[in-house]
């Protein structure tokens, strides 16, 4: 089934992206957000949305508010709270299409904002799907983005390449041990931050099925 262009302007910020309706829907839904240098058309998000929709999970891949505001360039730190507002609205809007369990996640920056939102609002999503969590900036291993991890009580699946400069597998294992919720780390061999190849979408789907009890 072809994805449908999606736009909801009934509230602020607007929710814009593409909706992949589930084949044989389970009623469950997933919101996916992109990384700092990308948008909702990112190949990883597209392949993940297709895989999850084929498995019965309606998936909405969205442009975060910072990307709606300008087509290129990274987000400004001061804009992050509005990006989290966009994630929250996307989950609420998706409830009207998928009335079952709702999941949230994304790639890199999008996944990081999802964890921060879930740490503040633990009932928002049933589980998180996090591709290439940006644990720290490249070559700055002490600048960890984990301050909220002890407050994260949403089950979280991390999908991470073993060549990711934003965090080694050892660093990721140490970091996710701070999370008091169930966590699982799916290691993608010979993959960098973009997670190209290796049937990442299919592997993430199978791991998430087992992890989230789908």
Image (cartoon, rainbow, N blue to C red):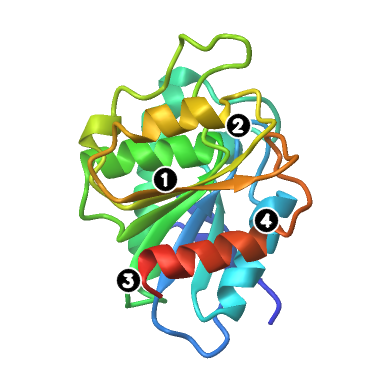
The residue labelled by disc 1 is: 86
Farthest residue in the bottom direction? 24
Label 2 close to label 4 by CB (< 8 Å): no
Residue drawn at x 29%, y 31% is: 178
Residue 45 vs residue 16: left or right?
right
Q: What residue is at 53 percent from the left and 34 percent from the top?
A: 109
Q: Which residue is mark 4?
A: 200
In space, the residues marked 4 and 3 are separated at their CA atoms by: 23 Å
Tell me if mark 4 has few (under 14), some (14-19) or many (20+) residues whose alpha carbon lies within 10 angstroms of its own.
many
Precedes in sequence: disc 2 or disc 3: 2
Do the residues bearing badges 2 and 3 touch, measured as CB atoms within 8 Å?
A: no
Quadrant where the N terminus is found in the figure: bottom right
Q: Is residue 40 visible?
A: yes
Q: Earlier in the sequence, mark 1 or mark 4?
A: 1
Work out how far the residue at label 2 is from the one at label 1, CA to CA, in angstroms: 15 Å
Structural distance between the alpha carbons of marks 2 and 4: 20 Å
Q: What residue is pinned by disc 3? A: 101
Point 52% across, 12% down: residue? 141
Q: Nearer the viewer, mark 3 or mark 1?
A: 3
Task: Identify the residue under disc 2.
Answer: 36
- In this rendering, the answer to whether 54 lies above or below 80 is below
The picture places residue 187, in percent across and down from the top left corner, at: 59, 45
Above-or-below relation of 92 to 70: below
Residue reaching furthest to the front:
170
- In three-dimensional space, the C-alpha distance between marks 2 and 3, rounded to whole angstroms, equals 27 Å
Which mark sits nearer the N-terminus, 2 or 4? Answer: 2
Closest to the observer, 198 or 41: 198
Q: CA distance from mark 1 to mark 4?
A: 26 Å
Residue at position x 32%, y 71% from top? 101
């Amino acid at each position: 089934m072809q994805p449908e262009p999606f736009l909801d302007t009934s509230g602020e910020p607007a929710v814009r992206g593409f909706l992949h309706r589930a084949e044989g829907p389970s009623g469950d839904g997933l919101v996916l957000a992109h990384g700092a240098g990308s948008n909702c058309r990112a190949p990883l998000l597209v392949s993940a949305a297709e895989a999850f929709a084929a498995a019965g999970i309606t998936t909405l891949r969205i442009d975060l508010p910072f990307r709606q505001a300008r087509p290129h360039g990274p987000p400004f730190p001061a804009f992050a709270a509005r990006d989290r507002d966009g994630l929250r609205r996307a989950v609420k809007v998706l409830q009207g299409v998928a009335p079952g369990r709702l999941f949230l996640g994304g790639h890199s920056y999008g996944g990081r904002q999802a964890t921060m939102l879930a740490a503040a609002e633990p009932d928002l999503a049933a589980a998180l799907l996090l591709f290439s969590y940006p644990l720290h900036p490249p070559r700055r291993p002490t600048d960890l983005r984990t301050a909220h991890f002890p407050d994260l009580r949403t089950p979280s699946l991390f999908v991470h390449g073993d060549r990711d400069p934003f965090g080694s597998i050892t660093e990721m294992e140490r970091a996710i041990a701070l999370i008091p919720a169930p966590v699982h780390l799916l290691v993608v061999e010979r993959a960098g931050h973009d997670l190209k190849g290796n049937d990442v979408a299919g592997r993430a789907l199978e791991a998430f099925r087992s992890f989230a009890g789908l």
